[in-house]
Amino acid sequence: MNVQQAKFQDSFADKAGENFIPDRSSFPERVAAVVAAAASEAEEVDRDARFPQKAIDAARAHRLLGIQVPQNFGGDGASIFDITDMCYALGRACSSTAMIFAMHQTKVACLVRHGVGSAYHEGLMRRLASEQLLLASSTTEGQNGGNIRFSSAAVERAGTEISLVRNATVISYGAQADGIVTIARRANDAAGSDQVLLAITKDDYTLERSLEWETLGMRGTCSAGFELKFKGSSEQIFPEGYDRIHAQTMTPVAHLCWSSAWAGIAAAAVERAQAFIRKAARGAGGQMPPGAAHFNAARMTLSKLRAVITTNLDTYAAHEHDERALSSLDFQSSINLLKVEASELAVETVMSAMRACGLAGYRNDGGFSVGRLLRDVLSSPIMINNDRILSNIATASLMSAVPGTLRD
Ligand SMILES: Cc1cc2nc3c(=O)[nH]c(=O)nc-3n(C[C@H](O)[C@H](O)[C@H](O)COP(=O)(O)OP(=O)(O)OC[C@H]3O[C@@H](n4cnc5c(N)ncnc54)[C@H](O)[C@@H]3O)c2cc1C
């Protein structure tokens, strides 16, 4: 356990004692209200490529944006299990809302796990809970693609004042966010891999649009390119280096939350396929339509998808404050493979659901259309490209042992 994590545990113990249990009883009702808001505008959000304002307003009203913040900083202390369940529930209603929520919660997790002990970051956690701030993410830069462990833009320092100018190729909901969590090179003379993480709020930065996209899916995430210009204080840099935050929190939480959102999209497609097959069977006097086989295939891949997510969730939750376990080859390989497997299974599930529905699934209108879900889920293998991940972990995979038992 490192110093930050020890402080984090102490601060919990101060407030609530060893047996601290966050009150989760209000979560289902609050989540259901946000899911209903998200579902009510999902079609328009996609058609007009607009931000899901109603859903995010509802998330604010029901205090879901700060739900992960510990209770002693004003939040609910929601666990990784709670957060991923929320991503899944939102994914069934509106993919873009789910992905925005997943990205936001990943940034909050960095604050919660690596900001304790830093006055600035603790203050930001309190603001997150009281003002329900929405945080965006800026990792992609210039022509660097998904190579997150390399930064070009460097933090410029003048005493305690710092500044950063970043060619942010894509920031989802950048224009709507109240703050951004971004990586940068530690200093002008630092190597590209010597990175820090900064949490900045919109009074400290400007965003100038540099690149518009007309996207295939996830259109409500309003992902565009920006030039990010920031001026602030050195205390906005997280005390720990980005390499550790990346391994312990950014990668695991992003992969768990994204995968849960994709599983939600896949579940929505399976639900449509089920409704279609039931209707077709009723219309044929109980005779199963030929597409039923594709419906079963969709159900099978959805089961695999849920299993791979929950297995990784259990492993992460069991070791979430154990730096050594999280840095191990086994854990890092597994959590990276989760992203690859979950995205492939989610695409496969939605494709099978579409084939089960046939023409009714292929058309863009009607109650059985799977078009939007398919376009949205196709973002999953390229969001940090699976090829890049597989090639990055090839050596680690070779070195990690093949499991000796079923539950290893
Ligand atoms: C919906 C959506 C929302 C996003 N939101 C954000 C956001 O809010 N903030 C943010 O910073 N970024 C965001 N991104 C960007 C994302 O995080 C990745 O950086 C981006 O998807 C990578 O883009 P790329 O395909 O150009 O890059 P690359 O990773 O460079 O991939 C380009 C091509 O090169 C291939 N390739 C790359 N490396 C290898 C390798 N080692 N071996 C074999 N082939 C390789 C890939 O297969 C691919 O064909 C978002 C992306 C999506 C799809």
Image: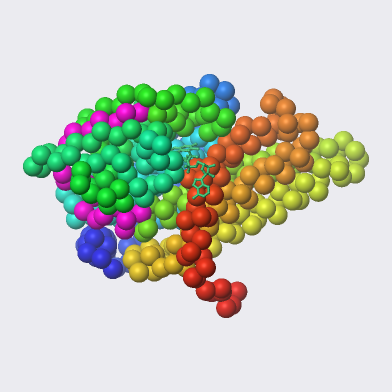
State the residue at coordinates (25%, 30%).
229
Residue 127 figure quarter: top left
How many numbered marks have been drawn onto this rendered protein structure?
0
Where is residue 61 drawn, in percent x and y?
A: 38, 34
- Examine the image and state in which quarter residue 144 appears: top left
Q: Nearer the viewer, residue 66 or 156?
A: 156
Residue 41 visible from this viewpoint:
no
The percent position of residue 210, horizontal first and vertical second, equals 37, 24
Give the residue furthest to the top: 48
Q: Is residue 265 left or right of residue 293?
A: left
The N terminus sits in image quarter: bottom left
Q: Residue at x 47, y 49 (%)?
A: 257
Q: How is the image coloured?
A: rainbow
The residue stretch that appears in magenta: 226-246
Say which quadrant the C terminus sits in.
Answer: bottom right
**Is 240 one of the magenta-colored residues?**
yes
- Residue 221 lies in magenta, yes or no? no
Q: Say whether residue 337 is left or right of residue 279.
A: left
In the displayed orientation, state which residue is furthest to the bottom. Answer: 404
| Above or below, comparing residue 346 to residue 403 in the picture | above
Residue 141 visible (yes or no): yes
Name the residue at 63% across, 50% down.
Answer: 345
In percent of width and height, residue 389 lies at: 49, 52
- Name the one closer to the observer, 181 or 149: 149
Residue pictured at 77% horizontal, 37% vertical: 357
Q: Position of residue 57 (x, y in %)?
A: 40, 31
